[in-house]
Amino acid sequence: MKRKFVYFFSKKQSDGNKEMKNLLGGKGAGLAEMASIGLPVPAGFTITTEVCDLFYKNDKHYPAGLEKEVDENMRKLEKEVGKKFGDANDPLLVSVRSGAPLSMPGMMETILNLGLNDRSVTGLALKTGNRRFALDAYRRFIMMYGSTAKGIDREEFNHAFEALKSQRTRQRLALPSHAKVNDTDVDESELQLLVEEFKAIYKRNIGQDFPQDPREQLWGSVDAVFGSWMAEKAVTYRRVEKIKGVVGTAVNVQQMVFGNMGPKSGTGVCFTRDPNSGENTFYGDYLVNAQGEDVVAGIRTPIKLSDFEKADPASYKQLVDVRRTLERHFKDMQDLEFTVEEGRLYMLQCRTGKRSPAASFRIAVDMVAEGLIPREQAILRIKDKDIEGIFYPIIDPDQKEEMKKNFLVSGIDAVPGAACGKVVFNAKDAEAAAAHGEKVILVRKETSPEDVGGMHAAQGILTATGGKTSHAAVVARGWGKCCIVGCEKLNINYEKGELSVGDSVVRQGEEITLNGSTGQVYRGAMRLIKPEPPASFKTLMGWVDKIRAIRVRTNADTPYDAAKGVELGAEGIGLCRTEHMFFDTEERRLAIQEMIVADTLPGRVEALAKLLPFQKEDFKGIFKAMDGFPVTIRLIDPPLHEFVPHTEEKQIQLADQIGVPYEKVRLRVEQLHEANPMLGHRGCRLCITYPEILDMQVRAVIEAACECAQAGVKVMPEIMIPLTIDKKELAILDQRTRQLADAIIRERGARLRYLVGTMIEVPRAALLADQIAEVAEFFSFGTNDLTQMTMGISRDDAGKFLPDYVDEKKAGVFADDPFQSLDQDGVGMLVRMGIEKGRRTKPGLKIGICGEHGGEAKSVEFCCRVGMNYVSCSPFRVPIARLAAAQAEIKRKQASAPAKAKKGAVKKAKPAKIKATAKKIRKTAKKQFPKRKIVRGKKTKKR
Amino acid sequence: MKRKFVYFFSKKQSDGNKEMKNLLGGKGAGLAEMASIGLPVPAGFTITTEVCDLFYKNDKHYPAGLEKEVDENMRKLEKEVGKKFGDANDPLLVSVRSGAPLSMPGMMETILNLGLNDRSVTGLALKTGNRRFALDAYRRFIMMYGSTAKGIDREEFNHAFEALKSQRTRQRLALPSHAKVNDTDVDESELQLLVEEFKAIYKRNIGQDFPQDPREQLWGSVDAVFGSWMAEKAVTYRRVEKIKGVVGTAVNVQQMVFGNMGPKSGTGVCFTRDPNSGENTFYGDYLVNAQGEDVVAGIRTPIKLSDFEKADPASYKQLVDVRRTLERHFKDMQDLEFTVEEGRLYMLQCRTGKRSPAASFRIAVDMVAEGLIPREQAILRIKDKDIEGIFYPIIDPDQKEEMKKNFLVSGIDAVPGAACGKVVFNAKDAEAAAAHGEKVILVRKETSPEDVGGMHAAQGILTATGGKTSHAAVVARGWGKCCIVGCEKLNINYEKGELSVGDSVVRQGEEITLNGSTGQVYRGAMRLIKPEPPASFKTLMGWVDKIRAIRVRTNADTPYDAAKGVELGAEGIGLCRTEHMFFDTEERRLAIQEMIVADTLPGRVEALAKLLPFQKEDFKGIFKAMDGFPVTIRLIDPPLHEFVPHTEEKQIQLADQIGVPYEKVRLRVEQLHEANPMLGHRGCRLCITYPEILDMQVRAVIEAACECAQAGVKVMPEIMIPLTIDKKELAILDQRTRQLADAIIRERGARLRYLVGTMIEVPRAALLADQIAEVAEFFSFGTNDLTQMTMGISRDDAGKFLPDYVDEKKAGVFADDPFQSLDQDGVGMLVRMGIEKGRRTKPGLKIGICGEHGGEAKSVEFCCRVGMNYVSCSPFRVPIARLAAAQAEIKRKQASAPAKAKKGAVKKAKPAKIKATAKKIRKTAKKQFPKRKIVRGKKTKKR
């Protein structure tokens, strides 16, 4: 069958509808839809996105038959409108607009008044009885066609106009030399001159006369639209916004209507609800006697809709009716463009309106209350960015000028939000300043566990190296603390106490502002605002929790984080990293360092004994914060060299403090050096070599749990062994853990149940999960490390090449950074294998994820799909994970609903099987952990 | 059914046979077998290894019923022999010997004359009419029981004996004080005194009288045998020799026969063929009038078998008959122990004899010629160590004393063979010394690619760090150069120019000797010998090549290595690492460093152009050496920081040489630093970032190939892209490679076919092999890196914990070091997946392995089993791989032969499927590469 390249739309007939966004673009589909439901839309036709695709696939040639189809549609349009394209007396004028399936800045936008030429401009003047209007339309057309379609610098036209206005008009109007002259002050004869001047500019630039043939004008414009699809700005935008799978833009050719025909004419843009607050009020701007591009150009100041109502109540009434119709029809807030031509309203665009995070929640919840949409729909409309926007402070957007002026450098947006403070270059200074109540930004080449105290004390963190999963980023994310990393242009000179970007120098103590949401750094202190979560946020998240089928836990290493997690909706801890506790105080740090330097078992045991009370206290605090929720505690994981000082000065100091010769410290540190620490002596390998570390940690966990349990706290500790690669290895540590734990429980006469399980974070563990599940009571997928090893990519070093791999313009190998969004093909295959094999051995095996991916929407959906019991993420991402889990469940139900209807249909074996397993598991999980009613924030009234 | 714990053997009845080694131990099975084929074996019984296993499983208690069974068998033995155990007048005396399934030094060996006591010794004297003999037997028994079973220091007994001999006998014999006194010179009365003295020693040590009850003596001895199974020496031996799956030792209780009853008596050990040369001559020692332990003690010098023949032809004749019978029966060279008691031969042991590498080949080939065994059997008997022993020099074993005296330190035996030379501490000194004809040993903390020249110049390499697959080990192995790594006790002080182990210091220029086969280092220069490969080696390897079903290639980076590989039987190059070429000369090194420091594309291209002619020449040399064989060339793989200098001095020098500011070099080196270089910016990621490197390398390969082809060389280049993780990534580089290669071939008008394929060395590549095979024309499994990533173990750092993981006494998680022998469970699963998925996409996909595992026997067998087309390994391991491939094929045929017979039987789906695929592939492979007749070494006569 011949493919249809052009779709017509008018009140009488619309070939398209709103479902055809991919083929007709957003604008084309919207126009077709509006026309088909009887709204006043100027007639026209849409050339499909497929033509754009074929154009590029066929070496910039249009598919055969297109020209004929366009001609046919133009004849249809002429018939509908009753005017002829190119007619000298009463010409049909059209607009040509691009319209991709997604709103896409950077592409050619609009050419208006197409069809005018030297002859028809006169016809138009006669027909409208308004020569000034006709000339104004013509000069606009020449300028738009010349600049937009043919690439002539718009400034040339503007200059000419300004020159005209300044030299002649001012004289004529006898205005003072500095007075502003409005476009509308220019008269007919001046416009006539301007038309000639514009045509001259055109010829000078293009080398040909301005085309008089409307067909040539049309195809020139169509060429320009399709050409702009691959313009650098558009390509960059698609890359930055990660827009993929969109094949091209459509072109909309539409009968012109004129907002510039007098005081009963005008043009406007509006939203059916307030896009900032989400309030159900009509919101927009209107410009009297103007064409669309005047609004964009910002030359004149538009009036508010309320003033429009006062100025032209009849036209306004039409618009209000359209607003109601559209919201009922689309069941979402719409962003509209319209023109009033001598008292008659025409709709030029309608699309789903962009909105602020707060408005997203309010509109969704309101529309449920209004009966427009079901709750599921409301939930599906919320994006993870909406939640981020609710929680993090932002730079007050009113400071655009200051932001432009003070921009310093850009890095990688590791943790969103904004922060400002005085620059400090080391953790100690940060802590000291914070102790004096000063706000500081910690600036480092990179951070290490030793910096954690200073990082916590700082308002925000800025590093010159590292990616989104570098130490700085991961730690900061855990706290929801603004963080920018991998700021490669940043030169840091610790000695001088200054940072520089090119010639620009910022000294210690000077203020900077970070925008963690964009990665931008500014000199000076910007004004920050913190949006207040609207009531609708709580309402919607309540629905979310009812719908989602898997649990959401948090990663937390301290009682503070644990409490934060619970406050944000976490139902347990999925990852408590015990080693961060070692850096909390000088005393702890010394104890762990003494343990590492000791070269005998008794020496190590003695040093570890000093740590025991600290860890125990930490665990008690965490258990209390998590009363009634499970807490997964991971045994020591990082290689020991992360705990020891690496400079001679600090080594001497340490030797002094723990009373051993400096040489011994130096040698031990040297001996701990590893070529690839990620694959080195870490994780459970440490406990194989030094089982006394396991003993101390298990003792701390179990003693703390016993004491809490005996004090009436509901404790559910889950001891997690990291980096397992073999069943036998796990069995050795599992046995040691249980023997000790059981002995302590017996000795204390406590009633305590605990689990022992393992991380699945090395490919071999996933491959042999069936064997490992013989020992483990739970699995937690550590997808950070699993990604590193499965893909062979060190996340600390990935900054050197991974950006090229994700950049579509460079290699474009991956759609997403695999450390942000789980690589479902590769790493995901291992996760699926691990789950399937693990449950083959233990059908009810509890399985979760505790990598960074546990707080990323697409990854959470994956976790739901493959049948995990829970995801775990940093406290500030808990709401995102809750939302994603609910969305996944809604999509699952929606996908299975039609499947149920046509039960006989053949399904692919595997997904069905996985789904069935997932369902079974969810059932089991619900039984194992009946949902607790969670009351947080404001107490309910019944108390 | 009750388990049988004791197996009787005698001429009349043997419960066991030679197949029951696991249950009866080697000795027990051999005795049973010899008895059952009618050879003269003193009767006795064997307590099974199962008893030993149960003994340890049951907290050192014997299983119920054992005692009764032993008593029954003792009664049977009494009946057979016609004497009573413990009889005062004519006692039945027995020997008690341990006998594990494998020969196992370190365990308790033998207690003779058991059953003697103060009364029966008189009975024995009367019965034999030889009181001296009876007393001698008794004093021996007391000494053996006291020392061997009860742990009294043997020296106490020896001292007492020596004291006796020196003080009294010398007086009596009026010998000068320095004269040697033989045991046989001691008379009856002196022996009587000795017996009393020995009993006194026993009582002094044990606190009890020497046991007079023969049953107590028997169980004391049995206890001692089983107890010795877990003695440290035995456990260590099993660990070192990687003996697993052996549950325990058996105990043999056997009627005593006496070689010490006069000149017509004696005892001997012999081999049915010469165990050193393999020559088919009778080989052994005989000691007249002696018991077994006299041979071991080395107090008297035995005579050769030829002298035995002269001295006692009748007894010798019996032995020769036994020799013939046993070789015919066992079809292998046997190691025998026998005793002649007054002209009558008794066999005490028979087992497969250990032999030198040369003898292994000779005996195997001779036995085929003699019609004793088929060729397949001959091939299966050769071990990889036999081949190593043929090629590598060894320390002349006659220097035992010197070795003991000069032993310095032990490291990891990375590359076998021996080397001696003067110590140097850096590559430059090594090169300089070698240029003067001096032999040196390069001693480094660790080696890097910059050291390669010096490593090549040295006789051997010794490093303080690293494992068997560290840089030093891998490079040295490629050359078959003796190398010891991970010598952790070694302190190297580069500044002072000395190494030390504890207080022992060796200065630069002093000589040391390395034994790469054991990892031991000696001071001074030992005498080395290099065994000459026997003719039988070539004969047998000829059979090997006819039988094996997969190809064996070599890893070679130079024409020299390539030629070496061909000489040793390689049929192509499986891995040619191009980066080693960059270090060959100062000029090349500078060019690559200039390329790295350059910050513009033209700068890099210019520097690369300097490298092009060098690489091209190298490739031409390699293609010529490999005329008619495929050559797989891997594009640049290591991270760039491996190519740049890391000391300030060298950086300044480099800056000077390439004419850029020092600061620029320093910054670039700093920038190249990576936290985990193994998972960093390397492999094909470099070519994604710097495609100009790919361009240069592809140009060098293809231009060299065109020129060789046009000169009549048969060239088959295979360009291999390393570290691929995604189909799209590979497609980008594949396309660039082909475009350039095709253009060069067209331009030169050459006729050249080439392949483009990839390494599968990252887990993701194996997981997504079906997609990757859409692009790749061949796969080569890089199992070194695949092992590192799948197991999460950096081979450079594994030395810190992996030994514990392999050590059965510690964690014992793995049976073998996974970097030596492929981890078939985990990594192997990915390899199987990769092959299966790859061939699902491309059924004929050529697949090989180029990791270190390609030269390790068990891994090669795995490669055969999973259907690879070839293995590739360093030149010196090529014969080992050829042998392993043939052995794998023989085993496969043997395994499938009975399977064919019972075709109806149910088989597991997967292995069968894999086998079928493997078979199909082998067929295809044979078609694609018909076997070329390879003539090397001596030319055939027809020429």
Image: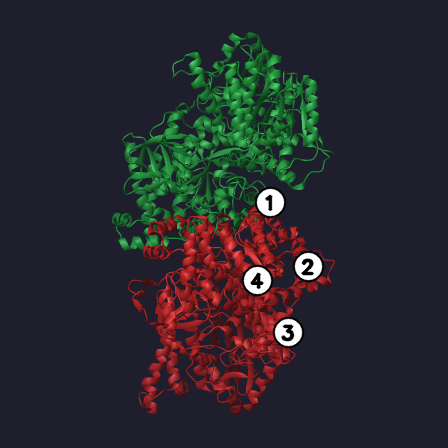
Chain colours: A green, B red
Q: Name the residue carrying label 1.
A: A840
**Is residue A219 positioned above or below A369 on the image?**
below
- Dot 1 amino acid type: Arg
Location of mark 3 (residue):
B375
Secondary element at image label 1: helix
Circles 1 and 3 on the same chain: no
| B34 with respect to A204 (left or right) | right
User: Identity of the amino acid at label 3?
Assistant: Arg
Residue B762 position, x and y percent, is 53, 51
- Secondary structure type for disc 2: helix
User: Which image quadrant is residue B484 in?
Assistant: bottom left
The Cα–Cα distance between marks 4 and 3, rounded to whole angstroms, is: 40 Å
| Res B876 label | none
- Foreground label between 4 and 2: 4
Q: Please, what is the three-letter code of the amino acid marked with disc 2?
A: Lys
Work out whether disc 4 and disc 2 sit on a shared chain: yes
According to the image, label 2 marks what residue? B920
Q: In which quarter of the image is the C terminus of chain B?
A: bottom right
Alpha carbons under labels 4 and 2: distance apart: 31 Å
Is disc 4 in the same subunit as disc 3?
A: yes
Q: Can the viewer see residue A369 in this picture?
A: no
Q: Compared with residue A486, is residue A172 higher up or lower down, i.e. above or below?
A: above
Q: Do labels 4 and 1 share a chain?
A: no
Query: Chain for mark 1?
Result: A
Above or below: residue A857 compared with residue B931: above
Residues beneath discs 3 and 2 located on the same chain: yes
Residue at image mark 4: B705
Chain to which the residue tagged by mark 3 belongs: B
